[in-house]
Amino acid sequence: MAMASATAAAHPNLALVKYWGQVDPVLHIPANSSISVNLSGATTTTSVTFDAQLPADEVVLNGQPAEAPAQRRVSTHLDRIRDLAGVQSCARVVSENDFPTAVGIASSASAFAALSLAGSRAAGLHLGKRELSVLARKGSGSAARSIPGGFVMWTAGQEDTGSYAYQIAPQDHWDLRIVTIAFRAQPKEVSSLEGHRAAPTSPFYEARLRTVGITLDVVRRALLQRDLSALGMAAEREAMSLHAVAMTSRPDKQPWMSGIYYMEPETLRVIRAVQQWRQEGLPVYFSLDAGPAVHLLCEPAHLDDVTTALGALFEPRELWVMVSRPGRGAWVVENNLDPAA
Ligand code: PMV
């Protein structure tokens, strides 16, 4: 292969049942299964070109050469693809997010989903959805869930090939709106990888794992029945379960921290407001990730009321808002295997 390239795109996803804690930190085998929805409002687009002339992998992220840790993480992922395809060449990777990286929306899910699809196609592989999900998972656990479209279950599995995500309902199954609210940029003190590692030190981790099976059933049923209040209440308790574990776990690299706090005052302000809005009759529910951003779930008919209520809570310059629908799975934008190209 002299030169072969492919471009692929993927959305990030919001977990309704969270992935928090791993049984295998190298292969990213999670301690529990999780359920998510892809976020149509944000896209990562990634091009991969294998080029026999390149002396080393080149990685450009949002127009800038990647810093060493990101470069290594991408190269390690390219090695997985090279191993699968029997390709030796180095590659040029160019990746763009159509959303500001600085607002703190986790982009590793869309990034590793798009990289897995573009990289495997450029290497001449046509992996099935399940194999692609397994591959993306090794880049970043939650990336496994950005491969299938719509509403997705990631089955934890026991070993490498058994841990993958699949669709439980297509994106047009339920015309939900997800309003993502991010606040001013601040570097994350504790990465999700460190958070996963610290989770078992929380006394509530075992309790979470004992009950998460019931939550998976409740959320799956609520999704299939399009029951927003059942889904929303379960999603809120799930988000707080992750944070309860994080706040009571001991990060090994930050001995000065008694626990991991991802929330900011603004996060709590939205949470309290959401409960009040519901009491006043507005059906809207929240979810959180391992960061200060908040995701709100509502039906399209209530979107305007939700954004108006948010507008009354913050100055426009204080926040960044993105509205999503359930999004499609990772897709190929372009694939050129012509050696003369
Ligand atoms: O894929 P990671 O290792 O960045 O973990 C993501 C963890 C959460 O976003 C907090 C929860 C989830 O299930 O996506």
Image (cartoon, grey):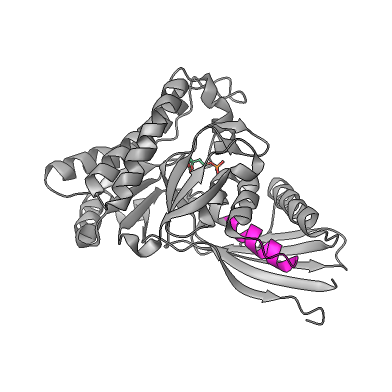
The spot of residue 211 in percent (x, y) is 39, 27
Residue 250 vertical position relative to residue 54 in the rendered view, above or below = above
* The quadrant where residue 330 appears: bottom right
Most extreme residue toward the top is: 203
Q: Which residues are magenta?
A: 111-127
Image quarter hosting the C terminus? bottom right
Q: Quadrant of the N terminus?
A: bottom right
Residue 322 in view: yes
In the image, what residue occupies the spot 57% across and 32% down?
22
Toward the viewer: 61 or 5?
5
Q: Is residue 98 left or right of residue 170?
A: right
| Magenta span main SS | helix
Q: Residue at x 58, y 20 (%)?
A: 255
Numbered label tally: 0
Q: Relative to residue 219, is residue 87 drawn left or right?
A: right
Q: Position of residue 230 (x, y in %)?
A: 25, 42
User: Does 283 lie within the magenta span?
Assistant: no
Is residue 266 at all visible to an observer of this figure? no
Q: Is residue 4 left or right of residue 169?
A: right
Q: Is residue 29 left or right of residue 213?
A: right
